[in-house]
Image (cartoon, coloured by chain):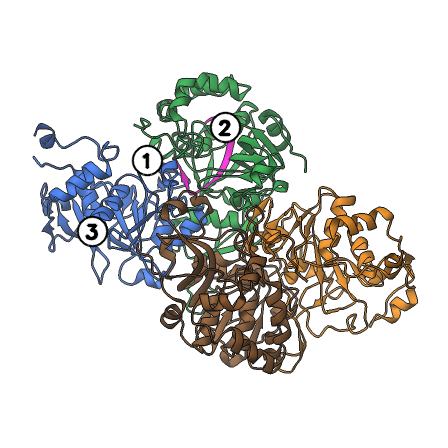
Chain colours: A blue, B green, C brown, D orange
């Protein structure tokens, strides 16, 4: 029994990938936690912004939507979608976007649109929103996923957000000047992409699991040869996350069982 | 300039026709033009053609009530209260609506192109995605009525030989834009506080602009700080005084989104029967905003009332 | 975010190189970045490549002082004080500068395209004019350094078969944008009051942004009304405190344009000799803004001081 | 000796062409006077805006530049060049632009750029500014000119702002959806454009002159067959213009001799 939840280690693992000075395109949920915890621990000059136009809000209360009025308070600038989305592609900044999706393939391409076809639809998701834009134009992308075979698929039903496309230099050949997924953070570990092939491999697995289990939950072949166990959350990390970032556990959800009984 | 103040009923009757292309202001849970949307449903408008970026409670209601034939959008959901809009999902899967998917930047650039009189607009966003490869609208619908001849085109950058491929998008010029604002001056000047999303572009691109507003304020007040104003007076065709006009979505500086109501909706939206009950209970009976607000109840409204220093309701139970 | 406060001398030394492409904020007689322009002249920068819409006192000075090699512009004048800029006209006729003419919308759209990461931008403006038919830059200069390969291209609307011809323009991404603002917060947030002209687009399009400002104010003050702010803190590379930094052009809410000085300039600008005397008297000697303002004199500054209710100097003798 | 100046009758003649509800794209000088006087007399719901972004300022003092801080006060909206120039082409509004130029041809095309060529320049003007945009995109254009042969030319040195181009339907064929010059207001009279040929003709000449004199000051053949004498300024018009619009005579300049001596 661990003394932290999967949500907690996901937020912290993603937060560790943030550099000081990064301009963070945050959604809600996990990405809010990751962005905020990184700012409080090791990247104080990182800035959070939302596609709705809120740039660097004070975040005294956690927003539950990117259009939450909480993203409009004591910001540096309150602006518009047009401005926020164009900030994504500003070549001057290391803009890092946190994205989620319904499906992902081994090159980090994402589906958040539909399963089946327009003619014969099987399932509908909300659509890409600004994810396609972030995947196309940001400096880098960090993806949150629940690690399940049905989500990590050989072939997407619909490619909403371009990752490394067909791997290798496909993304550059398609005309994207930068960007591409940096990491996939799941409830089991952290995946990264091979420098050459741009294929996903297991970089870190959480202490709660092992590489074989992660591979078994992945619907395509996952290279686990480079995997190492993640550093468990430090006391500081957990304290900041729990007491400072989400004291109401609006996004964190229930405390881990061991902690509760302590 | 005389202010064209109307009731929602008169504005919908006068300005919205079956089949119109309509842009909805706001974003998911914020500043949705709910008062006017409920009136559209009461007047049983049909075959509407919605053009939105990320909607939202208003889109859910219109689709659920059977007013909508086609939608161009980037995102159909109500944030945490419905990561995929239940009525949107159902109508799509049952093929009751035709849906064309774009990205948020695509939609925003298209509104901007419409607002600025640009013949088209180009971006790198979405290259090699199915958003640019596939089309949800039937080929027969293309080029008819308000449906653009092409969803978009992929072409080589005409100026930069190393520019590679770009996505060229048609402008949007909706028949009607529905905007909920905090203030309209009695001269007609419109001010949106907080994030404007793409409301300004939508209004400027539209043939007709209908604004519901929390307050009508004196010209002296609104022109004291013109840097904060959003739309000039002559851009607005009809103004509807609408206290809590965005409820159950939020209106910065006036009220928060209403988690109690949105959770109720979340429960009633998925099934046709319960959704019909929602309409019977929350949409059809009310011919005035006051009646609707009485049904919401003062206790609820007090809970979501915005704090003057913060613009939202601090400590609101948002589970 | 630590605020990078510098002197004008240090900022010019660090961020502006000979040959750089530079966007000037403001418009003819308003919010020209005069302090930094005088410093550029003192540091004898050469071969600058100016990209502006309608300038302006700052452009006149830079061209006159021999800092400029090429200009892309829509309008070169100082309004009523020089309907055609004297130094601009002279340098053009003597072929000391290469000039490429665009329209204001062309230039503004090009800055916007640069700011928004659009590969190009299209408009109907200027079809069949000599602005789109002729080019002032030599063919050999095209495609080298910051000079775009094409001034523009005329093409058929790719989406609308009845759309006819359109003008396709390259984006602008200047090396440096020089902006004069009323306020910068001690967090770096920048606020321009009154009309923003194309300053925001210019700053967002630029690789480096230098802001001179009337006041540096506490973060608490500037973030109390973020709807009014113009640029986020991380967009600004250097901040230079600059009271009266736009003098002799205006700065809304702080001071009016200075008709006495602009009339003096008007007299001294046309001839090389008298212009050189202007530089000797009003530019070269001052290594601090305080020294310059002493030369302007308190009487003059009091005359142009803005009235708090109006933002300009009512009753100012503007003949 | 007349009891009004050429500047006064020019402002009033142009003002008479304004319809109630028009959205007026004003420069400074005469166009400010024309716009303001029409608003005070017969077009109270006309709106004045400036390319710099000031929409409907109170104009308690006359601005002497479109970037004058006086265009930013008690406006409906303070915005930007991008917004103001896009308002010009808004299909919903009858946007009327007041323009001036160094040269004009018989189809109302304007030169405000240069004489000679880029290679061999003879004279330089400021450039089109927003005039090319207004001439291209506004609903209609009213042009102010000093009536001189060297300004009314057979062939422009440089076409900065498209009028009726080569006449007839040339403007529509070029792809402009609307617009074109409505009238040219000079110190001698008001020229309009033939419905079919789009060639300039003399519509009105001021009482101070006659059609032949106007034709003699025009560098191309000017049809004077339809010319009639202008209505002289009414007392109301002069009173509003002098006492209300420009009491300091910043733009109007010196009073007419007869008035001064009265």
Task: Give the CA separation, mark 1 to mark 3.
Answer: 24 Å
Determine which residue is flagged by label 3. Answer: A42
Residue D212, percent across and down?
92, 67
Tell me which chain the residue with mark 3 is part of.
A
Q: Nearer the viewer, residue B267 or C230?
A: C230
- Estimate how packed mark 2 is, as few (under 14), some (14 to 19) or many (20 or more) residues with alpha carbons within 10 Å: many
Residue at 54%, 48% in the rendered image = C308
Task: Judge left or right: residue A150 versus residue B237.
Answer: left
Q: Secondary structure at mark 1?
A: loop
Q: Are marks 3 and 2 on the same chain?
A: no
The reply to whether the C-beta atoms of the residues labelled 3 and 2 are less than 8 Å apart is: no
Q: Earlier in the sequence, mark 1 or mark 3?
A: 3
Determine which residue is flagged by label 1. Answer: A64
Magenta stretch contains residue B65: yes
Count up the numbered dots: 3
Residue B245's disc number = 2
Q: Which residues are magenta?
A: B64-77
The reply to whether the C-beta atoms of the residues labelled 1 and 3 are less than 8 Å apart is: no
Residue D149, percent across and down?
81, 73
Residue D20, percent across and down?
74, 43
Residue at 63%, 71% in the rendered image = C266
């Amino acid at each position: 029994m661990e003394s932290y939840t999967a949500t907690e280690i996901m937020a912290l693992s993603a937060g560790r990938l943030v550099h000081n000075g990064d301009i963070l395109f945050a959604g809600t949920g996990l990405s809010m936690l990751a962005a905020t915890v990184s700012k409080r621990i090791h990247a104080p000059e990182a800035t959070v912004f939302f596609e709705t136009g809120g740039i660097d809000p004070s975040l005294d209360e956690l927003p539950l939507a990117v259009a939450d009025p909480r993203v409009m308070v004591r910001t540096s600038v309150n602006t518009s979608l047009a401005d926020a989305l164009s900030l994504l592609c500003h070549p001057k900044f290391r803009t890092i976007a946190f994205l989620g999706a319904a499906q992902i393939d081994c090159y980090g391409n994402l589906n958040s649109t539909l399963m089946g076809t327009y003619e014969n639809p099987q399932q509908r998701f909300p659509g890409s929103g600004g994810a396609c834009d972030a995947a196309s134009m940001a400096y880098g992308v960090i993806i949150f996923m629940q690690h399940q075979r049905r989500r990590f698929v050989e072939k997407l039903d619909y490619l909403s957000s371009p990752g490394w496309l067909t791997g290798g230099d496909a993304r550059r050949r398609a005309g994207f000047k930068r960007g591409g997924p940096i990491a996939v953070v799941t409830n089991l570990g952290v995946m990264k992409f091979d420098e050459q092939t741009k294929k996903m491999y297991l970089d870190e697995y959480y202490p709660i699991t092992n590489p074989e289990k992660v591979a078994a939950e992945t619907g395509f072949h996952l290279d686990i040869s480079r995997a190492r166990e993640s550093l468990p959350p430090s006391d500081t990390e957990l304290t900041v996350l729990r007491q400072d970032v989400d004291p109401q556990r609006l996004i964190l959800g229930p405390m881990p069982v061991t902690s509760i009984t302590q | 300039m005389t202010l064209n103040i109307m009731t929602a009923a008169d504005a919908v009757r006068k300005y919205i026709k079956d089949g119109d292309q309509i842009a909805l202001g706001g974003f998911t849970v914020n500043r949705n033009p709910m008062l006017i949307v409920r009136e559209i449903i009461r007047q049983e408008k049909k075959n509407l053609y919605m053009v939105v970026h990320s909607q939202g409670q208003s889109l859910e209601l219109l689709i659920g009530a059977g007013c909508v034939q086609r939608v161009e959008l980037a995102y159909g959901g109500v944030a945490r209260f419905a990561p995929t809009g239940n009525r949107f999902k159902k109508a799509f899967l049952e093929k009751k609506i035709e849906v064309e998917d774009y990205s948020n930047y695509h939609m925003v650039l298209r509104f901007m192109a419409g607002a600025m009189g640009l013949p088209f607009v180009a971006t790198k966003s979405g290259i090699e995605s199915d958003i640019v490869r596939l089309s949800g609208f039937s080929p027969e619908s293309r080029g008819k009525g308000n449906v653009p001849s092409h969803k978009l085109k992929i072409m080589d950058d005409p100026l930069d030989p190393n520019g590679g491929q770009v996505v060229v998008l048609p402008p949007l010029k909706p028949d009607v834009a529905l905007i909920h604002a905090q203030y309209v001056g009695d001269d007609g000047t419109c001010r949106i506080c907080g994030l404007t999303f793409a409301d300004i572009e939508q209004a400027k691109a539209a043939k007709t602009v209908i604004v519901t507003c929390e307050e009508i304020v004196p010209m002296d007040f609104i022109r004291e700080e013109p840097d904060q104003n959003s739309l000039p007076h002559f851009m607005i065709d009809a103004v509807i005084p609408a206290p809590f006009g965005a409820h159950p979505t939020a209106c910065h500086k006036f009220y928060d989104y209403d988690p109690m109501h949105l959770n109720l909706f979340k429960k009633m939206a998925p099934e046709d029967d319960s959704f019909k009950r929602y309409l019977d209970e929350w949409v059809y009976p009310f011919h005035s905003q006051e009646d609707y607000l009485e049904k919401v109840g003062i206790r609820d409204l007090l809970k979501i009332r915005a704090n003057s220093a913060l613009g939202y309701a601090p400590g609101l139970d948002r589970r």
